[in-house]
Amino acid sequence: MKSTSVKKAALLTGGCISLGVAVIGLFVPVLPTTPLLLVALWCFLRSSPRMHARLLAHPVLGAYVRDYVEHRAIRRGARRRTLALLWLSLGVSALLIDSLHVRVVLAVVGIGVTFHLLRLHVLDPASRPSDAAAPGRDTPEQESP
């Protein structure tokens, strides 16, 4: 087996594992979903263009990853849902766990993630250049043929 095929197989495996843990992270409060999705996307970019395209085209995760990678932004509704789910799951976890240390860690993680999400730009789909002009209509940036 060639070293490039071993490298591709390792990257593909790493991408699949990252993607799987990221999906679990949607429901578990301490697992960082976005960084794991970005790792998966990076691994797929270097190992499997088909998997890279599939992740970007995914109906739920694709838009989220594209917005973050292309615009370093998040949609307002996605940010609201993420923050609500984050604090709901952290709150339930804190109620179920009797350790003060774990509660402090949960609070620190929650504050850190909240701070990061609030620092991201809000992506308004109506103001995106690709969405602003209807297909076939000229805009100031485009020249007529």
Image (cartoon, rainbow, N blue to C red):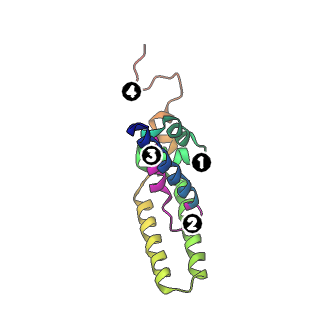
Numbered badge on residue 60 = 1
Q: Amino acid at mark 1?
A: Val
Q: Which residue is mark 2?
A: 28
Q: Which residue is mark 4?
A: 141
Check residue 35 for magenta coloring. yes
Q: Earlier in the sequence, mark 2 or mark 3?
A: 3
Q: Amino acid at mark 4?
A: Glu
Secondary structure under tag 1 reads: loop
State yes or no: discs 2 and 3 in contact (Cβ < 8 Å).
no
- Tell me which residue sits at (44%, 37%) in the image: 1
Q: Earlier in the sequence, mark 3 or mark 1?
A: 3
Closest to the camera, between mark 4 and mark 3, is 3
What's the distance in space between the residues labelled 4 and 3, CA to CA? 39 Å
Q: Earlier in the sequence, mark 4 or mark 3?
A: 3
Query: What residue range appears in magenta?
Result: 25-45
Classed neighbour count for the residue bearing mark 4: other residues with Cα under 10 Å, few (<14), some (14–19), many (≥20):
few
Number of dots carrying numbers = 4
Closest to the camera, between mark 2 and mark 1, is 2
Q: Amino acid at mark 2?
A: Val
Q: Which residue is mark 3?
A: 11
